[in-house]
Image (cartoon, grey):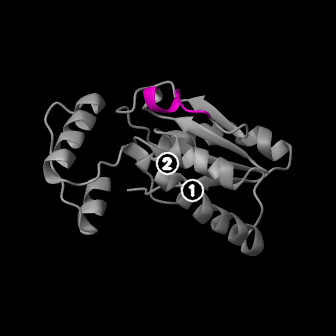
Amino acid sequence: PRQQHVAALGARIEWVPMGYMSHLVHRAKAIARERGVTYLPPGVDIPEAEGVFVANLREVWDDLQRFIFTPDEVWCAMSSSMLARCIAQAMPQVIVHAVAVGLKSAWSAKRLPDNLVVHEYPKPFEVEVKVDAPFPIDVNYEAKAWAWMLTHDGRRRRRGQRALFWNVIGK
């Protein structure tokens, strides 16, 4: 689904055999060098993007509070950690729960904001999770975070708290 989405936006998809992440990254960097274009790592996790992401997320946070509600916590799926880190920076007054579904080598090396709590999903990325959600959800990514959040739902509701789930793209 993600490949179809970016292709519809104009991206050219280049299939790489032997699809382990380290091999994909190596091949993507080589292709970028060959073509004279910028390599963007998973999650667009580069310093130049972080400030832009945080600024835009602050606008989302302001609009969310003004027009909808103020959540007590935010939940999201996490791989590179870029989105989770940026949400936590843009919304420092809430706890951000990120369910790590892969790329531990990337996120474990980063300095994470104090209001970011990481929950490691216990199964590999390629294991699909079937869960009912009120929106389109990717079975290898957001579904894991949604399922994890729901297991903590009773405690939150007893405390009278409200949560926001950040769905990246769905299916």
Quarter-wise, where is residue 25 in the image?
top left
Which numbered tag is attached to residue 2? none
Q: Are marks 2 and 1 in contact (CB under 8 Å)?
A: yes
Residue 87, given in percent of the width and then of the height, sits at: 62, 51
* Label 1 Cα crowd, 10 Å radius (few <14 / some 14-19 / many 20+): some
- As drawn, the label of residue 47 is 2
Seen at 23% across and 34% down, the residue is: 26
Q: Residue at x 58, y 65 (%)?
A: 56
In the image: residue 58, left or right of residue 2? right
How crowded is the residue under tag 2: few (<14 C-alpha within 10 Å), some, or many (20+)?
few
Q: Looking at the picture, how far across and down is residue 108, in whole percent?
A: 53, 27
Residue 109 belongs to the span the image colors magenta = yes
Q: Quadrant of residue 52?
A: bottom right
> Which of the pair 157/145 is nearer the observer?
145
SS of the residue under disc 1: helix
**Residue 1 shown left or right of residue 168 in the figure:** left
Residue 51, numbered circle: 1
- Identify residue type, mark 2: Pro
Would you say 28 lies left or right of 171 here?
Answer: left
Frontmost residue, 22 versus 35: 35
Part of the protein shown in magenta: 105-111
Q: Is residue 53 visible?
A: yes
Q: Position of residue 58 (x, y in %)?
A: 66, 63
Q: Is residue 85 left or right of residue 79?
A: right
Indicate yes or no whether the magenta region holds residue 11: no
Residue drawn where x is 75% and y is 40% of the image: 154
Q: Position of residue 62 (x, y in %)?
A: 72, 68
- For the C terminus, the image quarter is bottom left
> Looking at the image, which residue sits at the far bottom?
67
Kind of residue indicated by mark 1: Gly
